[in-house]
Amino acid sequence: MICIILIARTDIQGREVVILDYTISITNKCNLKCSYCYERHLNTEYGCINDETRDKIADYIKSQNNAGTVYLFGGEPLLYKDTVKFYCENLTAKEFVITTNGTLLDEDFIKWCAERKIIINMSHDGIKCTDRGADTALLDANLKLLLKYQPETLVQLVYTEQTLPELYDNIMYLKNMGVKKVSAAMDAFLVPDDADSFGDIMREQWRKIAEIPDLFVYELAVKKKNIRENKRSLCEICKKKIFINWDGSFYPCVQFQNIPEYRCGDVFVGIQAEKARKEHPDYSMVSERCRGCEIAEYCRNSCACRKMATTGTVRDISEAACMEEQVHILTALEIIAKENGGNKI
């Protein structure tokens, strides 16, 4: 999930309006079968936005007059292109971002988005995508078509323990197709068979990735920025972003969907987050494993969404996620030192 920046503006009465980013789950259904898919692990009821809920979601967001970025999400949102278009045409927001697996992209839809400056982020895991149930040749063709109209598109890949040794090669595969921006995220459910070996391979792969010229790597770019600015973000329930499920219910983030204790209202009654905030003062707590860590000040693992995704609780972070964060921080620090002529921060 992309980092959120809190912005404020005023309404016509001069009152401050806090800008929220909205993630709308068009559906949790998908036409692929990725082993690492978060939705599949949730084991929840599958569905899509019906017409009544679609309209209620739009009415609610318009009534708040505070939309920053609107993320159109799934499952695979392009299973319901008309619903995606409906929100892009009927909401006013700073920007719209569609996250898609790319299989259902076509030139007409890509052009439609490009004409309206609607951002498409596409997932593509690199050389072999057959484990996802995807045709790599189809994804390659659709990615090239997307890059024709949106050359700065962000391509998102997920790596598993099995594909980690090829992470650099997979990123180079994308770069050689013309990709300028990538994001590489670890399978949230990963539990390494050999933690030491896994950590060594991860460190080696990210060091090589950091050396790739003329490529924006989201994880390293954000980490560098936050280290330089000495900036840590604070996770707060429904204060900066809201996840709207396909049934119209509100949750703090996608990782909390369909967990009753984190439900924060819906489009029919509005945000009702105080109960969840009172019941979960541990939402942004630092995990026990993080106490005393020398690089904890640069870490994002206090993020409740990340903890929930990797352990199913807001109280702890998985060992693999901890290792990934350490590698990102150490790699970013090395880049900064090199940019500073060998001097550390």
Image (cartoon, grey):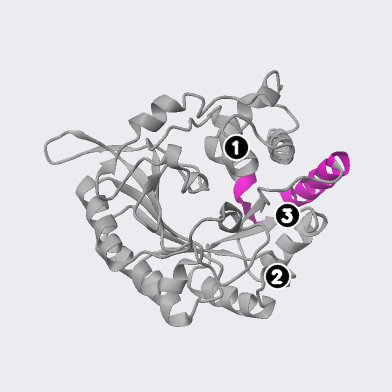
* Residue 104 x %, y %: 51, 76
Give the labeled residue for mark 1.
307
Give the vertical position of 255 relative to 234 (above or below).
below
* Mark number displayed over residue 135: none
Is residue 81 toward the left or the right of residue 302 in the image? Answer: left
Give the quadrant of residue 137: bottom right
Q: Nearer the viewer, mark 3 or mark 2?
A: 2
Mark 1 surroundings within 10 Å by alpha-carbon count, few (fewer than 14), some (14 through 19), many (20 or more): many
Q: Residue placed at 70% from the left, 25% from the top?
A: 289
Q: Secondary structure at mark 3?
A: loop
Give the labeled residue for mark 3.
212
Q: Which residues are magenta?
A: 195-220
In front of the other: 1 or 50: 50
* Residue 15 x %, y %: 17, 33
Is residue 216 toward the left or the right of residue 206 in the image? Answer: left
Spatial separation of the CA atoms under disc 3 and disc 2: 22 Å
